[in-house]
Image (cartoon, rainbow, N blue to C red):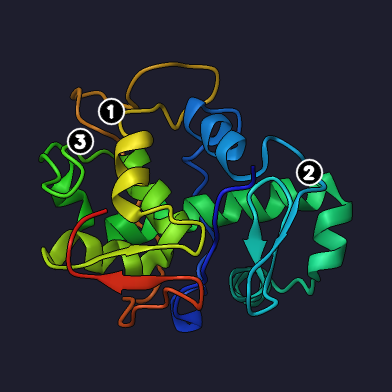
Amino acid sequence: PINALLAGFDPQAAQAESTGSIALDSDFISKLRGSESSGKTSAEYKDKKGNRFVGLDQIGSPRLKDFNRATGNNYTQNELKEDATKQEEVASWHYNNHADNIKKQGLDRFIGQIDPKSGAEITLSGMLAVAHLGGFGGLQKYLTDQAYTAKDELGTSLSKYMKKFSGLSVEGESSGPDLDSQGRPFIGPEAGAEVIQGDMLGSVFEAGKQAL
């Protein structure tokens, strides 16, 4: 079944072009899309409040607005659902923008640590999965607030995504962790995105006091 759901983040943080270090044919993206949409470009999910999430990556309206603002496009969710090429364009920006902001905000300092909520090693792929599920603000809060967790309306928690997608390659046609020349997890060049201030989890999340 389609897993849940993509929340947008602060629109003020979505102005920069991505640098293109996350490959759409990577192990990470392949596994995430299998979880989100069963690999179907026509997939659509509608939550209890009527918010739609469409395509391979289950893109919601707030995140699509972030993309349109950053790139000068004006895609609609209907157009996205019907056009696989547009889905790839949006997805490339989406994942790389999150990777750029992980670098920009210094969240890469957590890489290699053990996440106390999931028990998994924190890796770039795990952080990207949490940002995809909970928004970038959700990732920030997840990593910095030990009392914080969240789940979507289907019951999928951020800690589950951290564990499920830990250690996957973000490079194309490869397996294993994505490493730089020094053997450390690669984040990619720093982009010019503004510092994200807020937590934009979206309507499908419930905050809790215990890790799920």
Q: Which of the two discs, 1 and 3, labels the residue nearer the N terminus?
A: 3
Residue situated in front as seen by the camera: 40 or 179: 40
What is the C-alpha distance between the residues marked 1 and 3?
21 Å
Residue for badge 1 = 180
Q: Position of residue 82 (x, y in %)?
A: 89, 53
Q: Secondary structure at mark 1?
A: loop
User: Which label was assigned to residue 91?
Assistant: none
The residue at 76%/71% (across/down) is 73
The x, y position of residue 24, in whole percent, is: 60, 36
Q: Quadrant of the N terminus?
A: top right
Instruction: Nearest to the eye among marks 1 and 2: give it.
Output: 2
Question: Which three-letter amino acid code belongs to the residue tagged 1?
Answer: Asp
Q: Nearer the viewer, mark 1 or mark 3?
A: 3
Q: Amino acid at mark 2?
A: Thr
Say whether marks 1 and 2 touch (CB < 8 Å): no
At a point 36% along the width and 54% down the height, the residue shown is 157
Instruction: Please give the name of the residue rendered at 54% of the width and 62% of the height, measured from the top-left corner.
Output: 6
Which residue was labeled with disc 2? Answer: 41
The spot of residue 211 in percent (x, y) is: 21, 56
SS of the residue under disc 3: loop
Mark 1 residue crowding within 10 angstroms, few (<14) / some (14–19) / many (20+): few
Q: Which of disc 2 and disc 3 is earlier in sequence?
A: 2
Q: Amino acid at mark 3?
A: Ala
Residue 141 lies, with reference to residue 99, above or below; the image says below
- Between the residue at mark 3 and the residue at mark 2, the CA separation in whole angstroms equals 30 Å
Q: Quadrant of residue 209?
A: bottom left
Disc 2 crowd, CA 10 A, few/some/many (<14, 14-19, 20+): many
Asked which secondary structure carries label 2, the reply is: loop
- Residue under numbered circle 3: 120
Q: Where is residue 109 shown, x and y percent of the image?
A: 14, 50
